[in-house]
Image: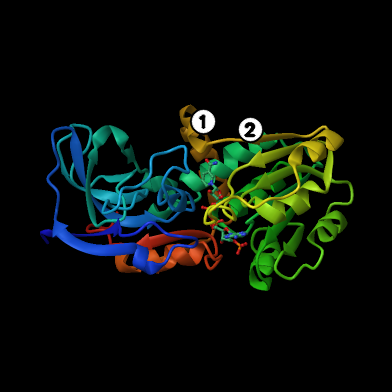
Amino acid sequence: VSQNRRIVLAARPIGLPKESDFRLETVPIPEPADGEVLVRTLYLSLDPYMRVRMSEGRSYASPIALGEVMIGGAVGEVERSRDRRFAPGDLVEGRVGWQEFGAVPGGSLRPVDCGLGPISTALGVLGMTGLTAYFGLLEIGRPRPGDTVVVTAAAGAVGSIAGQIARLAGCRTVGIAGGADKARSLRDRFGFDHALDYKAADDLAGAIAAAAPHGVDVFFDNVGGVIADAVMDNLARGARIVVCGTVSQTSLARPEFGPRAQAKLMAAWASMQAFNVYQFRDRHEEARARLAAWLRSGQIQHREDIVDGLDRAPRAFTGMLRGENSGKLLVRVAARKAAP
Ligand SMILES: NC(=O)c1ccc[n+]([C@@H]2O[C@H](COP(=O)([O-])OP(=O)(O)OC[C@H]3O[C@@H](n4cnc5c(N)ncnc54)[C@H](OP(=O)(O)O)[C@@H]3O)[C@@H](O)[C@H]2O)c1
């Protein structure tokens, strides 16, 4: 193979992205410069933050330029290396983007330890999403045994793990997700004590009050918007609100108006704190080891939603922003050359 297939940003989306906002291109495989590593992508991670980076001037990070390769984390195999730390055949994780081959700085890559779990888990439960659940819940949410923890987008990659860590911390867990199938999986697969389908609820705040009669001590929020408003009507005294993400707002031209948070926080003596998984970078390996042990012992379950073929990434990504994924959304781009 001498060609690289890649997906670039073709147009800035208005509202929910469309498949035509992306373009598949075939170009020569890049040559790694000194200090760079050529990585052949095996799995590509699809994540809500990518939607933010497709728009101009809306983010803490710079937008993707038109015609530029879509950004994204991937696990892959080292094809060629001009960094002494890596050799052909090594498994690595890093920002390769939506493409079959990427030349990336060696210093930005993380070696993947196959002993911890299947390769794909390096992007999910043992990767960025699992670490987000871990630090968001334990460090920002600070759960105590007996607390009631509510998680939104609870059947998703981050939410499903956050809920299970809360249960391991001795909490009662309430998961909120869209659709009857997801609500069922919250109870049957991920062990939530209560599951609420926000799409079927006429009175979501009332349903949360019934599931959390003593109030919500920790609210792990992935979505924002009206679902978060309903949870915030049910805060217990001293509640901690973990602002993990606002996926319900990212495709809107302007954030929705809603009730202001201050009065609700004051009434409950509550705190609200956003975080970024990379602020805990120094502790990622310690957390990964704990997540791997829980996974091995069966104390946490994870679910992956795997789509085959790079060309299907745009469709899968736009579907995720409509809630079509169940668990960690990944694209299988290629198979490993030599089985481990
Ligand atoms: N702070 C950090 O460092 C950090 C790091 C990683 C991820 N995050 C955030 O964590 C959140 C979850 O990410 P993920 O990768 O685990 O994705 P995910 O939950 O697997 O997928 C996104 C889910 O969001 C829900 N959703 C989409 N549009 C929605 C809408 N308009 N209203 C309500 N729900 C909607 C859908 O679930 P339903 O079908 O249940 O609606 C969808 O399945 C995101 O907000 C992401 O930005 C934060």
What residue type is disc 2 on? Glu
The CA distance from mark 1 to mark 2 is: 9 Å
Point 76% across, 47% down: residue: 259
Circle 1 residues within 10 Å: few <14, some 14–19, many ≥20: some
Rendering coords of residue 43 (x, y %): 35, 57
Point 47% across, 37% down: residue: 60
Q: Nearer the viewer, residue 273 or 184?
A: 273
**Rendered image: mark on residue 139:** 2
Q: Nearer the viewer, residue 36 or 253?
A: 253
Rendering coords of residue 260 (x, y %): 75, 43
| Left or right: 129 in relation to 20 | right
- Tell me which label, 1 or 2, sits earlier in the chain: 2
Query: Is residue 172 in view?
Result: no
Q: Quadrant of ligand 1?
A: bottom right
Q: Which residue is mark 1?
A: 280
Q: Nearer the viewer, residue 117 or 138?
A: 138
